[in-house]
Amino acid sequence: MKLGIIGLPQSGKSTVFGALLGARGQKEDSGSSRGGPRVATVTVLDERVDFLAEIYQPKKTTYAKIEYLLPSQIPASSPSRSEGGVLNQVRICDALMEVVRNFEGPAGSPPSPEPDFVRLEEEMILSDLTVAEKRIERIELDRKRGKKEGEREYPLLKSCCEWLETGDPLRNRPDLASDPLLKGFTFLSAKPILIIVNNEDEDEALPEWDHRPQGINPMLVRGRLEMEIASLSPEEAEEFQEAYHIQESALDRVIRNSYQILDRISFFTVISDEVRAWSIDAATPALEAAGAVHSDMKQGFIRAEVLSFEDLKTQGSFQAAKKAGLVRLEGKEYEVKDGDIINFRFNV
């Protein structure tokens, strides 16, 4: 799971990235900032993993991970800047986090979070429209040459263009945004998005929006303050969080929202003396979940032995839960639920 951090210049993207990175004292991925995007792979702490580790006492405990990517800045003189070079770096991401400035800018410029969001949204829509139109032109040219490549995607691309020309992002058309035939185009406006409103240190309120984007709930972060708190010792950090009414770190809040906008869940396995969390899409069939663990499990899938975390917690042990009839055998079409503890039975 990878999210790209975007925003207009001076919005505080690097500051927010620093707050996420410093929350648990983690470091950037090796080599990630050598002229390219900066990447931070953060641990998704989960009390359920800790509980399972206490019960099973494994030699290894593995939490889920999330990557946050901060694009490298492209010089104003670079030709690629006008072509959305910064935005193109996040096309590989599953979702976007847009940081909007809600503090006084350089030379005393007032904040304008909603217009800033709209401006970048328009850039993404225009970029997607350009990509779709170029592909349509190529398909039409191939038709004249007697080639039939792209026939299935052609009507979908036409629909994308019609929608984008209205100024609406593709994420508001889930049928197009999620169509497998369009996945390779990595449309920016089709990606789920989390708006990060970057406030002053003392400002605890979200700004008013005249037209809040459909299905998007902005999240408040005091980037500079929270980056500074992330650099403190746990004791000092707790003291400052209490003083500034911060209930949990920016990282924990962003992780929770990242899972929400991507509609992701976690299930757990206990295999070869390792307790491990796996992040998958909600409603993923058991067969596909097995493949996320190992291709052999998917290939030789027989049944999934499933126990919900809450049932395990209530009963206190796997044996007690099994005796109570709470351990179930499910088939390949079973939709995995958040918190499921699964033992995949397979034969290859």
Image (cartoon, grey):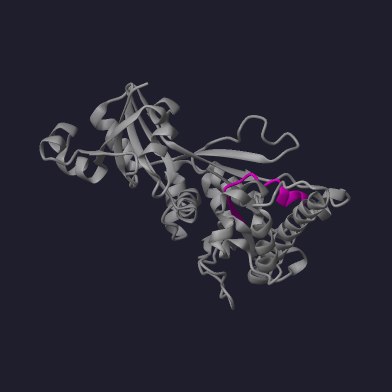
At a point 67% along the width and 30% down the height, the residue shown is: 31
Q: Residue furthest bottom?
A: 210
Residue 266 vs residue 230, the one in the foreground: 266
Residue 234 vs residue 346, the one in the foreground: 346
Q: Is residue 222 visible?
A: no
At a point 41% along the width and 56% down the height, the residue shown is: 247
Q: Position of residue 81 (x, y in %)?
A: 82, 52
Q: Relative to 163, does residue 127 appear above or below in the rendering?
A: above
Residue 254 is one of the magenta-drawn residues: no
Q: Relative to 4, does residue 301 appear above or below in the rendering?
A: above
Residue 163 vs residue 91, the one in the foreground: 163
Figure quadrant of residue 303: top left
Q: Position of residue 270 (x, y in %)?
A: 31, 29
Q: Residue furthest left?
A: 323
* Number of residue marks: 0
Q: Is residue 113 visible?
A: yes
Q: Position of residue 284 (x, y in %)?
A: 40, 45
Q: Relative to 277, does residue 153 appear above or below in the rendering?
A: below
Q: Which stretch is magenta? A: 84-98
Q: Position of residue 144 (x, y in %)?
A: 82, 52
Q: Is residue 334 left or right of residue 140?
A: left
Position of the C terminus, as image quadrant, is top left
Q: Is residue 81 left or right of residue 96?
A: right
Q: Relative to 321, does residue 348 appear above or below in the rendering?
A: above
Figure quadrant of residue 7: bottom right
Residue 91 is one of the magenta-drawn residues: yes
Residue 19 vs residue 279, the one in the foreground: 279
At a point 73% along the width and 44% down the height, the residue shown is: 72
Figure quadrant of residue 166: bottom right
Q: Is residue 196 left or right of residue 326?
A: right
